[in-house]
């Protein structure tokens, strides 16, 4: 695997003042020694709870933030010593819909950014229609962005991030706030880019999106990588048993503790779903716990009961739950 991104023991601290008048300076260690590698043409996912350090890591790789210690190379160039060379060859798209010119059309937005990137008129004439086609905005390119949906804006952001044909693309929560159809289209576009050789580093809070898209994933929590592997390996590594879900109305208060004590049960999570609670019980391989779980719920109104294989979301919650 030809490494395109190499991160070694990267750390980053921030100093922030607490309170409006207070003079105490608090140091926050946002990234606490992160190492990973991304190969050419890979789609690598960085998953983790809010504040885990994902954006800080990406910003260091994009040369927008200096590391406190450790090192990172993108396309063989050091992100500190060779920041300019890195910047020329990477693209990025951050979630949210700011950063476009509302009163300009998609085409004019792209022209504007193409000028900033230093694309010649000839390159622009070739590249802009190609990108509009890629992100599915052909036919709407003359409309002002102010009339665009969030999904369309995000696809335009993606086109902007690709103007200078970056070999590596960083996508930080690209599908945030986008409806299911829009985010499916975005996933298709990202997959297409990867199939054409672009290396992508993606963060997302949507586990099915990570599962569907990513070749490999690193789970980061509190500034450290807590697991790394293919989506399949993560699912198997954390729990290769089964997950039983029981929908129950009015579960006893101590149910979590009682079920955790059932032989074969590895973890128990409760989720509120409208008037019901869903009890998610993970059991080890070869253990059948449904009967025992239901026995502890005698007297409660039970809704749906199902048993399934663990999903990436189960694995994720197991890895970062309670952090
Ligand atoms: N400029 C800053 N000054 C002070 N603290 C910061 C700064 N930027 C980030 N942090 C802190 O660093 C930690 C990591 O933040 P970061 O934005 O990297 O997390 P994240 O994993 O991207 O989270 P999210 O999923 O919410 O986007 C947080 O505790 C955050 O408050």
Image (spheres, rainbow, N blue to C red):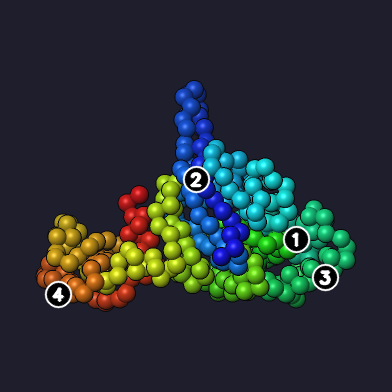
Q: Which residue is mark 3?
A: 126
Mark 4 and mark 3 residues within 8 Å of each other at the beta carbon: no
Q: Which residue is mark 2?
A: 9
- The numbered mark, 4 or 3, whose residue comes first in the sequence reads 3
Q: Position of residue 322 (x, y in %)?
A: 32, 51
Structural distance between the alpha carbons of marks 1 and 2: 30 Å
Please give the name of the residue rendered at 45% of the width and 67% of the height, measured from the top-left corner: 230
The disc at residue 272 is none
- The numbered mark, 4 or 1, whose residue comes first in the sequence reads 1
Q: Which residue is mark 1?
A: 164
Numbered disc 4: secondary structure: helix
- The numbered mark, 2 or 3, whose residue comes first in the sequence reads 2
Query: In front: 313, or 140?
Result: 313
Structural distance between the alpha carbons of marks 4 and 3: 64 Å
Please give the name of the residue rendered at 82% of the width and 55% of the height, measured from the top-left corner: 118
Query: In front: 242, or 19?
Result: 242
Structural distance between the alpha carbons of marks 1 and 3: 12 Å
- The numbered mark, 1 or 3, whose residue comes first in the sequence reads 3
- Residue 316 in sight: yes
Q: Nearer the viewer, mark 4 or mark 2?
A: 2
The disc at residue 291 is 4
Mark 2 and mark 3 residues within 8 Å of each other at the beta carbon: no
Numbered disc 1: secondary structure: loop
């Amino acid at each position: 695997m030809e490494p395109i991104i190499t991160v070694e023991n990267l750390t980053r601290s921030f100093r922030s003042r607490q309170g409006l008048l207070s003079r105490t300076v608090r140091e926050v260690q946002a990234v606490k020694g992160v190492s990973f590698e991304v190969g050419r043409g890979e789609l690598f996912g960085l998953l983790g709870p809010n504040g885990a350090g994902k954006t800080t890591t990406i910003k260091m790789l994009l040369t927008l933030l200096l590391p406190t210690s450790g090192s990172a190379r993108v396309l063989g160039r050091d992100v500190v010593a060779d920041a300019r060379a890195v910047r020329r060859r990477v693209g990025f798209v951050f979630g949210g819909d700011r950063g476009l010119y509302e009163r300009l059309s998609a085409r004019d937005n792209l022209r504007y950014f193409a000028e900033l990137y230093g694309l010649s008129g000839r390159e622009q004439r070739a590249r802009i229609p190609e990108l509009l086609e890629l992100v599915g905005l052909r036919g709407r390119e003359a409309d002002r962005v102010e009339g665009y949906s969030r999904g369309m804006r995000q696809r335009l952001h993606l086109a902007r991030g690709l103007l200078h044909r970056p070999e590596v693309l960083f996508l930080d929560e690209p599908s945030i706030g986008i409806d299911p159809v829009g985010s499916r289209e975005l996933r298709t576009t990202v997959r297409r880019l990867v199939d054409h050789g672009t290396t992508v580093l993606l963060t997302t809070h949507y586990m099915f999106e990570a599962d569907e898209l990513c070749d490999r994933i690193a789970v980061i929590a509190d500034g450290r990588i807590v697991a790394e592997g293919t989506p399949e390996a993560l699912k198997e590594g954390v729990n290769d048993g089964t997950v039983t879900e029981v929908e129950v109305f009015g579960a006893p208060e101590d149910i979590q503790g009682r079920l955790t004590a059932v032989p074969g049960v590895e973890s128990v999570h409760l989720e509120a779903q409208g008037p019901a609670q869903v009890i998610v019980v993970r059991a080890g391989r070869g253990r059948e716990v449904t009967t025992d779980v239901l026995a502890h719920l005698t007297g409660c109104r039970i809704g749906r009961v199902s048993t399934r294989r663990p999903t990436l979301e189960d694995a994720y919650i197991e890895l970062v739950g309670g952090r």
